[in-house]
Image (cartoon, rainbow, N blue to C red):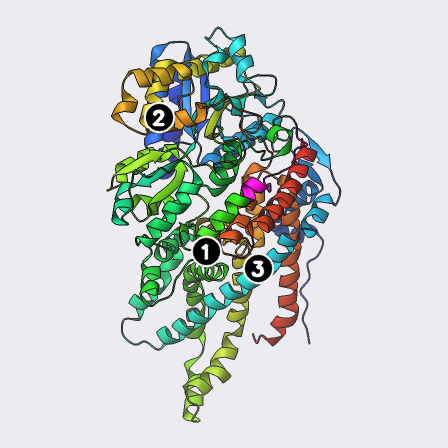
Amino acid sequence: MEKRVTFKGWILPLCLIAPQVLVSAIFFFYPAGQAIWQSLFIPDPFGLSMQYVGTGNFEYLLSDPYYRTSFLTTAIFSTLVTLCSMIPALFLAVVADRLIKGAGVYRTMLIWPYAVAPAIAGVLWLFMFNTRVGVVSWYLGQLGYDWNHVLNGGEAMGLVVVASAWGRISYNFLFFFAALQAIPKSVIEAAAIDGARFWKRFWTIVLPLLSPTTFFLLVVNIVYAFFETFGVIHTITSGGPQQSTTILVYKVFSDGFVGQDLGSSAAQSVILLFVVGALTIFQFKFIERRVHY
Amino acid sequence: MKNLTTGALIAGSTMLSPLAAYAETEVQFWHAFTGRLGELVAAQVEDFNASQDDFTVVASHKGNYSETLNAGIAAFRAGEQPQILMVFEVGTATMMSAEGAVRSVTEVMEASGADFDPDAYIGAVNGYYTNTEGEMLSLPFNASTPVLWVNRDAFEAAGVDPETDLSTWQNVAETLTALQDGGSTCPLTTAWQSWIHLENFSAYHDVPFATQDNGFAGLDTELVFNGPAQVAHITAMGEWARDGKFFYAGRRNEGGANFRAGECALFTESSAGYAGISSEAQFAFDVRPLPYWEGVGNSPQNTIIGGASLWVMEGHEDAEYEGAAQFLAYLSSTDVQSKWHQDTGYLPITNAASDATRAAGFYDANPGTDVSVLQMTANDPTANSKGLRLGSFDQIRGIIDEELEAVWAGDKDAQTALDSAVQRGDALLRRFEAAN
């Protein structure tokens, strides 16, 4: 039996949702509308003239094989960043949850990398893996492996994934850790009394109870990988070698802010908007079904 | 509350400073220089302001080259543009096409009472920023050209005579083999591969980079750097990369770290690398002219410049243009120019500044610092060696970088890579043509 609480009249509910609507309108709908409008033109950078091209910007983009490849690059990058930031975070949270002594110190240390800005994280990793003078690449050289992410696309991808995921592990750790603390001890103890070992308890009790957090982090991390990683890519590879680390949002940035091609950049933003929208709908429709709240 | 008060105080004090000088006409100058160069620019501005009472130049740092250009563009859209904006050479076509946003230096200078003689400027430097009617669009400020840097100690260590003639790529090719045989792990590296090995390469061999006089004669230009001369050079470089004779460090000047650390024997880099190399290198080094392929094209023609120029923007009062003109005339004066050239390694922009530097004995005291000047002024520029004027050029350079990386990695041969770069670049040029 469902109990419905309804408002009498329209004034109060409208007032209550007005701030949120206003914020969304100013910071989301207005710029998004501008992007859609601009994507129909090829403007000159100074705003002196606009050439109406209709869907020309979209046709230009979608007929470009390098742009289409960038979708695949983005998919690989986002998947790897999400996995590489969530799995270690979960592992660390589970381990930290079982700590008895010094838990606070470990927690603080694990959260630390989150304070590092993506661009700075990029530079740190770049120094470590610098082909000639990097510490890590030097050790790899001692082991007989010739590290060169400047020319090797696979290595470049690996490096930007690690650099992007690294700071993110802390963020995910924080959420997983809090969620683990919220699982009632009695449930786990009951299972333990029934003879379930650690892994059995983890798979059958802990993981399902973590599913709302996991789902939330999945959505948030994919959005992060899509939108917030271009600082890392800009400092480490600038999208290279060739185009092996040019993800969609990096191309939006470089075409718009470096290349001054605002029409193409706007069209790419619109495409990106739809891609992420579709992805989020997909996640809520199909993955959320498996989430137990 | 405390923060608010402090904020108000700061806001108040920044508002006060221009007030104190309200009788003078203010000229805003946005530039991209930090560190040593930033200090030198600040000193120039201070000196100019002290030299007269009518104008105050206010210099502001707006980030790197791209960011400064973006700041200028955004400010123009908001009606807040500075009088003088520094734009790197790659942005030249963007600025040129912005009719109604910029005012040519010739026009500004002639309208003012400032001294101005277009013939005083060095043609090879000036030509990059001059239109086909001979009108000077912007004032070259910091211009450099690529040269060959030689680590003499690395030559000695590999048992190769550092006095070897490196004027042609044929000789360099043999030397690279000798260096490698002598144990060098990095015989050659480069900075700015597109600028040096395609753009300057084309000018130096007097072969076109793009049609319509490299874009000077019109927006309907098409890239043609996939010609036999360029393909042969990139093929040779690709083979050197494969054999470990050419070490690729990155798209910008990453190779500089390797050269300055003493790892690499040869380095193709801007003449403005002088400041960094002379202060950091723990080895004996030489500056040599950029090599050319003997018998290819009309080599050696002259090389072209990189760096930035100063643009005067539209939408200001007459008095402000007068101030801008006075400041540009000050920057072009012989004393200021020769000091700038000697301090930075950038090219002098006037013949007088070059002569004054020579007369002062600077080139004798610092051997190699005149190589860039000689290399640029050796011959009168041709249609192929005047410079490049291409829209969306920053992005085209990015495309060239990508395709060259494919060659260095061995994924593509030179012809395929350059054909692809030309095709992709042309698409951008057509978009630029449509927008302007």
Q: Are both tags, 3 and 1, on one chain?
A: no
Q: Are both tags, 1 and 2, on one chain?
A: yes
Question: Residue type at mark 1?
Answer: Arg
Q: Quadrant location of residue A277?
A: bottom right
Q: Position of residue B31 (x, y in %)?
A: 44, 28
> What is the secondary structure assignment of the residue under circle 2?
loop
Q: Is residue B252 above or below residue B216?
A: below
Quarter of the image with the N terminus of chain A in it: bottom right
Camera-near label (3 vs 2) is: 2
Question: Residue sitting at 43 percent across and 55 percent down?
Answer: B243
Marks 3,2: beta carbons within 8 A: no
Q: Quadrant location of residue B190?
A: top left
Q: Is residue B97 above or below residue A13?
A: above
- Magenta stretch prevailing secondary structure: loop
User: Is residue A62 visible in this depiction of the protein?
Assistant: yes
User: Is residue A256 visible in this depiction of the protein?
Assistant: no
Q: Position of residue B392 (x, y in %)?
A: 59, 37
Furthest residue in direction top, as rendered: B113
B26 or B3, nearer to the observer: B26
Question: Residue type at mark 2?
Answer: Asp
Q: Which mark identifies residue A196? A: none
Question: Residue sitting at 44 percent across and 23 percent down?
Answer: B377
- Residue under numbered circle 3: A73
Mark 3–mark 2 Cα distance, whole angstroms, equals 47 Å
A7 or B324, nearer to the observer: B324
**N-term-proximal mark, 1 vs 2:** 1
Q: Which mark identifies residue B370? A: 2
> Magenta segment, which residues?
B218-231
Question: Residue type at mark 3?
Answer: Thr
- Residue under numbered circle 1: B242
Marks 3,1: beta carbons within 8 A: no
